[in-house]
Amino acid sequence: MLVCPFCGTESPYSIDRDIGKVGERELDAGLRESAAAERDRSDERRSVQCQSCKAIMVYDASRVGQNCEFCGSPALIAYEDIKSPIRPEGVLPFRVDRNRVRDDIRRWWRSKWLAPGRLATAALVDTVKSLYIPYWTFDASAHCPWDAEAGYYYYVNVEGRDNNGRRVVRQERRVRWEHASGVVDHSFDDELVPGTTGVEMSLLRQVEPFPTQEIVPYDTAFLSGHVVEHYQVVLLDAAQQSQAQMAAKLEQMCAAQVPGDTYRNLRIDPQYSGRTFKHVLVPVWLLTYTYGAKVYNVIANGYTGVIAGRYPKSFWKIALVVLLVLIGALIFFSIAQQQNY
């Protein structure tokens, strides 16, 4: 639906998803084109940067004066130094609506036993915001030779004496090391790298994955009524991060191929080909709220509904847990002493 922000009139909007597929772009060519002319996102939208958390967002011109969607700070300024932005190739539309995410956050709060009891009933969810945040996806074919030392366990009998001085024979484990090598061939599809720094990365990783197979071709109609963040992790940095992520996964695959019972000195030499990328926007619901003197964030995947966040802890509930642990420890030691007697 397209919804008028003034009168609330709803108008159906249909997109033929069979027309235009989300295409991949050749990575080396994309890196060479980093100085290409700036691509127009919208004449009626403006980029601003938060002076508190440094998030960069794209607002309607009439909304530039509002608070930062990420940290709530009112310190926003015009951000005019964005050079040669890469236009998104695809969008993952919102599937979780505002009413559902409000209810889900309340249930999430209630599931946190240490949270204050009145947190779930507070009207804090009224400030939940819908955002499209930038991601990069990378594809590559990897050919990865490896070599390592494979360890094989064997056991030998070792003579010794027990505490009473009696002769005993025990088995001792040893390792026989042998050279091993092999090759892993693997195709990476849509390796995700966040293009945002406005959302706490540890929370964002908890609500992943964003199902890239559901991404549709970029259409500004999807952005209506939502705040869009401009990417802050540039293509070069994202490509390097994706390669590091791929290398870590290849190392695990190579380790699984090493024969024997254990291994050491694993070395890999990954070689990548057919590298492609695309820039996409994914949906996130963000709630920034103040409880007491602290600010907390809760984020929800706008497609799957998965929630992650921070929440205050009740002093009295923590004290009760500590008290119960102490009582349990006293009971345990009391029973142990009685058994000794």
Image: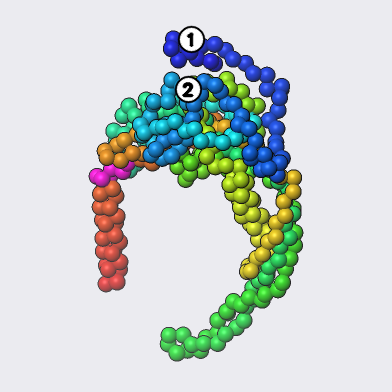
The amino acid on which the numbered mark 1 sits, given as a three-letter code, is Thr
156 or 115, which lies in front? 115
Where 204 falls versus 227 (above or below)?
below
Q: How is the image coloured?
A: rainbow
Residue 117 colored in magenta in the image: no
Q: Residue at x 51, y 24 (%)?
A: 45
Q: Residue at x 27, y 67 (%)?
A: 338
Q: Which numbered tag is attached to residue 60?
A: 2
Q: Mark 1 sits on what residue?
A: 9
The residues colored magenta run 312-317
Kindly indicate the quadrant of the structure image that contains residue 213. Answer: top right
**Residue 271 at what x, y percent from top left?**
72, 55
Q: Is residue 185 visible?
A: yes
Q: Which numbered tag is attached to residue 17?
A: none
Where 68 falls versus 139 (above or below)?
above
Badge 2: residue crowd in 10 Å (few <14, some 14–19, many ≥20): some
Circle nearer the N terminus (2, 1): 1
* SS for callout 1: loop
Q: Is residue 308 visible?
A: no
